[in-house]
């Protein structure tokens, strides 16, 4: 029988900054680690005097006082699943409240079940930017958006904990979220491609592909025994706008999410199926358009745009993972590899490389 593991949670010492930063960048591999800066203040978790996790914290001055921000929450991959993240979030929240912060915040990837559950357990609620402006004021909301990486992190969501006014979980209505999702992406296209001809045709096809993904994601959700709703992510709008403005094609994230999350194989299967149905739509419509490309320009343009949507699903790492590919990968690797192979072959054919 294994012994009881004793976890110590305390403030980070000065000589622990470098090892804590190194571990944080290990826990967030790839592009994500670029958003992790050297901390001034933090709380660490230790096992046998070795740092196995931590949370870096900041205080941001806003009009109504001070906003406490949980900058980075990380746990050594070898020690995950032991509740360390939950203890770190709770300890950091207590510390920031003791420093006089009336509002606490953090940002989490949309499908990062372990992290968002840690925030929920500590009294945080997922909020929209509109709700953030209500609690922080417009000045505070803008600082939250631009002082933190939220403006650049596509697929990230904002969580708040308001000491003076406990947040109630608000019911999310899918239809307004879908309309906002389509409308916002249309505005981004309008700003980026208005001078490109034929713009009207381009916009119609683009919205058709987005709407088709929403519809087939909903059909996938109907195959599971869960309640779902559609939600537009609040993070990354500035980066998305910039990429589109310079000629890229990079939609804002919007997807179907279960109302109840679980860290279980059944849950991963459920969200994997919804993502797979979306992926099948893009694969089928791109293939059909490619086969008819010689008949009209609308089919050629549809195949070209569809190939971009397929490419984003093949890349199952941040910042593309929220487009759905990682959901399929975490559910069933063989299915992911099959879909990725079919998609890659079609992408090469569409672009005349095969």
Image (tube, helix red, strand yellow):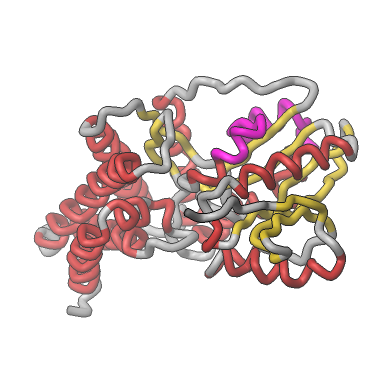
Q: Position of residue 108 (x, y in %)?
A: 58, 46
Does the segment drawn in magenta span residue 136? Answer: yes
* Chain part drawn in magenta: 117-139
Q: Which residue is drawn at 61% across and 31% down?
A: 125
Residue drawn at x 34%, y 49% is 206
The picture places residue 212, in percent across and down from the top left corner, at 27, 41
Image check: 152 left or right of 193? right
Residue at image point 24% right, 55% down: 302
Question: For the view shown, which residue lies furthest in the bottom direction?
Answer: 353
Image coords of residue 327 (percent x, y): 35, 51
Give the image quarter of residue 132. top right
Residue at horizontal 56 percent and vertical 54 percent from the top: 3
Indicate left or right for 295 with 235 as reference.
Answer: left
Q: Is residue 14 visible?
A: yes
Q: Is residue 298 left or right of residue 31?
A: left
Q: In this view, does 149 lie above or below 163?
A: below
203 up-or-down from 76: above or below: above
Name the residue nearer the viewer: 174 or 84. Answer: 84
Residue 217: percent from the left, percent from the top? 29, 39
């Amino acid at each position: 029988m294994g012994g009881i593991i004793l976890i110590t949670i305390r403030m980070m010492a000065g000589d622990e900054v470098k090892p804590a930063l190194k571990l944080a960048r290990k826990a967030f591999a790839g592009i994500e680690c670029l958003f992790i800066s050297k901390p001034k203040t933090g709380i660490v978790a230790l096992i046998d005097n070795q740092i196995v996790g931590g949370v870096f914290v900041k205080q941001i001055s806003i009009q109504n006082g001070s906003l406490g921000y949980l900058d980075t929450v990380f746990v050594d991959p070898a020690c995950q699943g032991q509740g360390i993240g939950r203890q770190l979030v709770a300890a950091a929240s207590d510390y920031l409240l003791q420093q006089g912060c009336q509002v606490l915040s953090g940002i989490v990837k949309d499908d990062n079940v372990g992290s968002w559950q840690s925030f929920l357990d500590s009294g945080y609620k997922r909020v929209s930017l509109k709700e953030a402006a209500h609690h922080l004021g417009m000045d505070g909301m803008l600082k939250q958006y631009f002082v933190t990486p939220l403006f650049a992190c596509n697929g990230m969501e904002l969580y708040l904990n308001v000491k003076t006014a406990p947040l109630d979980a608000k019911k999310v209505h899918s239809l307004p979220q879908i309309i906002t999702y389509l409308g916002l992406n249309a505005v981004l296209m309008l700003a980026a491609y208005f001078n490109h001809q034929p713009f009207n045709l381009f916009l119609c096809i683009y919205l058709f592909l987005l709407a088709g993904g929403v519809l087939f994601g909903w059909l996938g959700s109907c195959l599971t025994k869960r309640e779902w709703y559609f939600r537009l992510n609040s993070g990354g709008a500035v980066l998305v706008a910039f990429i589109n403005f310079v000629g890229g094609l990079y939609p804002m994230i919007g997807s179907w999410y279960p109302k109840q999350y679980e860290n279980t194989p059944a849950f991963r299967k459920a969200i994997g199926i919804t993502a797979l149905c979306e992926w099948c739509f893009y694969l089928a419509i791109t293939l059909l358009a490619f086969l008819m490309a010689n008949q009209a320009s609308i089919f050629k343009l549809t195949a070209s745009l569809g190939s971009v949507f397929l490419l984003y699903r093949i890349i199952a790492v941040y910042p593309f993972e929220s487009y759905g590919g990682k959901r399929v990968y975490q559910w069933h690797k063989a299915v992911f590899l099959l879909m990725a192979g079919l998609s890659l072959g079609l992408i090469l054919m569409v672009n005349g490389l095969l």
